[in-house]
């Protein structure tokens, strides 16, 4: 209680947590659940959507987290061993590619999801030139 009135209490709490032995031992023991990973990717890529296409929930199911299908009422596990397997990681990578290249649309059902990575990339960082656009696919060539 010696720092009870100190102005940097929050700093001291965070410092205590980050420097604790428990925190260092827990490093790398958790991984995002598939749905959390999918939503994080969509948020990071500033993905635009109104209704999420069914392909996204299917991908999460293939990653090992079928939506609303957990049998026991304790929720999905949040430990690395559950989600860090080859199939789950493969579908995470496929999901990232699908989102970034706009493969997951269901236009006939009005479920469109769009990610404009090129538009979000500052011009001075772009290293590829647009070569040809046909429909929804874009071909790139190096300058």
Image (tube, helix red, strand yellow):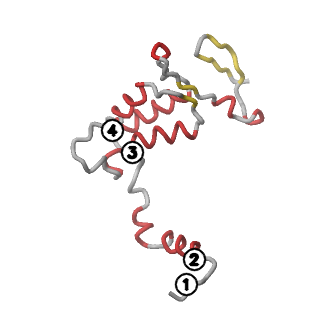
Which residue carries the number 3 mark?
A: 33
Disc assigned to residue 9? 2
Disc assigned to residue 4? 1
Of callouts 1 and 2, which one flags the residue occurring earlier in the amino acid sequence?
1
- Give the SS element for disc 2: helix
Q: Position of residue 73 (x, y in %)?
A: 24, 48
Circle 1 or circle 4, nearest the eye: 1
Left/right placement of residue 44 relative to residue 92 reads right
Of callouts 2 and 3, which one flags the residue occurring earlier in the amino acid sequence?
2
Question: 73 and 92: which one is in front?
Answer: 73
Of callouts 3 and 4, which one flags the residue occurring earlier in the amino acid sequence?
3
- Give the SS element for disc 1: loop
Disc assigned to residue 135? none
The residue under the point 44% across, 67% down is: 23
Which residue carries the number 4 mark?
A: 65
Q: How far apart are labels 1 and 4 at the CA level?
A: 44 Å
Circles 3, 4 touching at the beta carbon (< 8 Å): yes
Q: Is residue 15 above or below residue 34?
A: below
Q: How far apart are labels 2 and 3 at the CA level?
A: 32 Å
Circle 4 or circle 2, nearest the eye: 2
- Give the SS element for disc 4: loop
């Amino acid at each position: 209680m010696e720092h009870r009135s100190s102005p940097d209490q929050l700093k001291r709490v965070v410092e205590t947590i980050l420097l604790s032995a428990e925190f260092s031992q827990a490093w790398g023991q958790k991984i995002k659940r598939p749905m959390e990973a999918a939503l994080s990717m969509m948020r990071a890529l500033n993905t635009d959507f109104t209704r999420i296409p069914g392909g996204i929930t299917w991908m999460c199911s293939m990653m090992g987290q079928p939506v609303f299908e957990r049998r026991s009422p304790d929720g999905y596990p949040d430990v690395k061993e559950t989600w860090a397997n080859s199939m789950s990681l493969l579908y995470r990578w496929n999901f990232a590619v699908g989102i970034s290249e706009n493969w997951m649309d269901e236009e006939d059902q009005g479920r469109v999801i769009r990610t404009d990575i090129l538009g979000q990339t500052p011009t001075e960082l772009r290293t590829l030139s647009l070569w040809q656009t046909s429909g929804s696919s874009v071909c790139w060539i190096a300058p």
